[in-house]
Amino acid sequence: MSRLLSLRPALGAAAAGLALGALCHPALASALAAHLGEAPRRALGLPHLGALALNHLALAAGGLALTAGLGVGLGILATREAAAPWRGGIDGLAAAAQAVPPVVVVALALPVIGFGGPPTLLALVFYGLMPVLRGTASAIEAVPPEAREAARALGLTRAQVLARVEIPLAAPGIVEALRTALVLAVATAAVGALAGASTLGTPVVAGLQNQNMVPMLQGTAGTASLAFLCDAAMLAAAALVRR
């Protein structure tokens, strides 16, 4: 019973994701567009939409992997005594990166690294770095000092204290930070369509160009559905880590 209660937030997010995913069906998207006053027009087929969703998810996962590696690493570095003088600079750099809109990052990166996935991945890293860095640093700093002192009294080195005490105790907070970054990555990956990446933002851009609301609804609902489903997966992971 307690396990089921801990998974209630994940189940709620999963239900919302499935409901939004149902709106991607051509018949439902066309019916919704008609209800909004749009004349019925061509919708995307489910196979094509599924392929876009897989590409979208792969791009978001790649962005999360890069963000996690960089953000968790910098978050750990920021909590070390030797890096204390640099703490403000590290935090300010992450804040500045997130302050740049993803569309601007993609536009500026296009002439340098080309079209497709690379500029989108760069935008995902810029946008997700700050929550991961700050979440990791806060989670590690929240570890009780007594736990560190006890580990050092047992003869553990600083690296061993980090690996065996600090990171395991900080794991729920780090997972929560990664959850935020994943949802941001899924939502932001749609911008990759402007750089030529095949994502669920592609039908939104095409719909705007062709004045066709149906694929716009499908792409928007699909992106939101993926965000809720990924959020549900991370909520379930966080619940398991806390046990």
Image: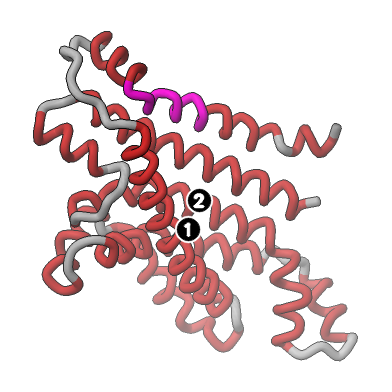
Q: Which amino acid does label 1 sit on?
A: Pro
Instruction: Please tell me in which quadrant of the rendered image residue 142 appears.
Output: bottom right
- Asked if 25 appears above or below 122 in the picture, the reply is above
* Residue depth check, mark 1 versus mark 2: number of the one nearer the observer: 2
Q: Which of marks 1 and 2 is nearer the N terminus?
A: 1
Q: Where is residue 219 in the image (x, y as percent from the top left)?
A: 30, 35
> What is the quadrant of the N terminus in the image?
top right
Q: Overall secondary structure of the magenta stretch?
A: helix
Residues rendered magenta in the picture = 17-26
Instruction: Please tell me in which quadrant of the rendered image residue 115 appears.
Output: bottom left
Q: Where is residue 240 in the image (x, y as percent from the top left)?
A: 74, 50
Q: Residue 180 carries which label?
A: 2
- Asked if 211 appears above or below 28 in the picture, the reply is below
Mark 1 crowdedness (10 Å alpha carbons): few <14, some 14-19, many ≥20: many
Q: What residue type is labelled 2?
A: Thr
Residue marked by disc 1: 131
- Asked if 109 appears above or below 242 in the picture, the reply is below
